[in-house]
Amino acid sequence: MSLDVRPAVSLKPFNTFAVDVRASLFAEAHSDDDVRQALGLAHARAMPVLVVGGGSNLLLTADLDCLVLRMASRGIRVVEEQDGQVVVEAEAGEPWHPFVLHCLEQGLAGLENLSLIPGTVGAAPMQNIGAYGVEIKDVFHSLVALDRESGALREFFLTDCAFGYRDSLFKQQPGRWIILRVRFQLQREARLHLEYGPVRQRLSEQGIEQPTPMDVSRAICSIRSEKLPDPAKLANAGSFFKNPVIPAEQAQLLKQRYPQMVAYAQADGQVKLAAGWLIEQAGWKGFREGDAGVHRLQALVLVNHGQASGLELLNLAQRIQADILERFGVVLEMEPNRY
Ligand code: FAD
Ligand code: NAP
């Protein structure tokens, strides 16, 4: 079937910040063939291509003079099973949370802490998505990506991906790799991670002392729903800044001035600060100017109350960055991908 390419499409429904910018051309790829067709068409028109998934980690600041290609390929399959170790492959366009639930329903553990993260399977390796002490790298088997430089397919294994904190090779080489499908190493017998944040406490409150992976998923969904705005009701792109990781000496000096400061020692001797705590201390929590604002419950999340433009959101983020630098001497790095 030939690719359905539409001109002058509003991207408002395709980014969770609900920013209303236009793409010169827009298409959805349901297969590898669609991806290749789209690349061919863009090449013929000398037009750049921007690949997107669920648009939940984007900040769009202007109309895009390019072909926006939304990954919509579907399919989940078990590709290997041995001694309780199961490799599951999912197509890039599979929505992330339903995929997590599907695996849990099949009795496959490993993804439970990553429940309720918006977006698609194909985008998950981009920033090595993480939550509640688990990152994609902990359950990653391999992926298949199309190299836009050579046109060839390439298989990546764990050590090829340069996964870091909200980082990967794919993020470091923007636009080069189109991730087509991802494989995860899951287990029939769960090894649960309950030590992070309020997870164990929430389970105890529910009277669950011997949780199943599904119990953990439900507990995390309930914690997240209380704290994080649902993009369908209040537009946002999740955490807007990464948690800064700073040298131990700097963290010690800050801790002397701010004894309540939230800080976590890292394996490499550095210290991770909770960016949300810094922003809240600086008085930004609940701030609103026009329709661009900071969420009233989680200062790390910028929100669009209605008609904010991408530039207004970017401007607010830059003011917060400057203020945090001045007050604490700490650089905040933006997390969403900006176009
Ligand atoms: P998009 O936003 O569409 O794209 C993100 C980037 O990946 C873009 O640069 C895009 O070009 C590229 N891309 C997308 N698909 C592909 C592909 N197939 N091949 C190559 N490049 C591609 N993130 C976390 O890590 N942890 C969380 O707990 C978390 N919670 C969130 C909560 C909320 C309410 C929201 C709104 C966001 C949250 N996020 C979180 C951020 C976001 O959900 C993830 O980064 C998610 O993986 C983005 O997926 P997406 O499909 O929406 O990607
Ligand atoms: P939280 O539980 O209030 O914790 C605040 C911050 O402290 C988190 O960002 C987390 O860092 C860190 N933290 C908490 N417990 C920790 C521990 N035991 N060891 C080391 N670091 C710890 O955070 P939250 O905002 O409600 O988010 C909960 C989880 O979901 C976090 O992992 C967060 O990253 C993830 N999340 C991510 C996004 C996104 O868009 N990227 C959006 C919402 C939630 P880390 O962020 O490094 O884990």
Image (cartoon, grey):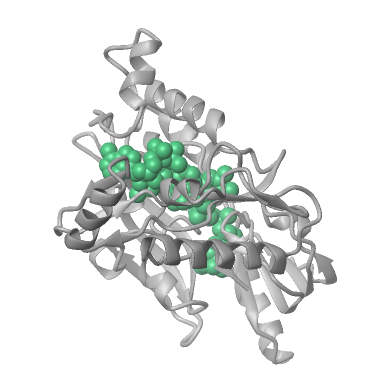
Q: Is residue 186 visible?
A: no
Percent position (x, y) of residue 170?
42, 71
Q: In which quarter of the image is residue 286?
A: top right
Who is closer to the viewer here, 157 or 86? 157
Question: Which quadrant holds the N terminus?
Answer: bottom right
Percent position (x, y) of residue 55?
63, 57
Q: Is residue 245 visible?
A: yes
Q: Is residue 330 shown left or right of residue 15?
A: left
Instruction: Tally the numbered discs.
Output: 0
Say if 206 sits above or below 258 in the image: above
Percent position (x, y) of residue 177?
47, 74
Q: Is residue 303 shown left or right of residue 278?
A: right
Question: What residue appears at the point 47 percent right and 58 percent down from the top-left corner?
Answer: 241
Q: In which quarter of the image is residue 171?
A: bottom left
Q: Which residue lies furthest to the front in this view?
A: 257
Q: Is residue 32 shown left or right of residue 140?
A: right
Who is closer to the viewer here, 122 or 202? 202
Say if 308 sits above or below 101 in the image: below
Percent position (x, y) of residue 236?
64, 50
Question: What residue appears at the point 25 percent right and 46 percent down from the top-left corner?
Answer: 264
Q: In which quarter of the image is residue 260?
A: top left
Question: What residue appears at the point 43 percent right and 66 percent down from the top-left corner?
Answer: 325
Question: What residue appears at the point 36 percent right and 27 percent down from the top-left corner?
Answer: 198
Who is closer to the viewer here, 292 or 14? 292
Question: Which quadrant holds the C terminus?
Answer: bottom right
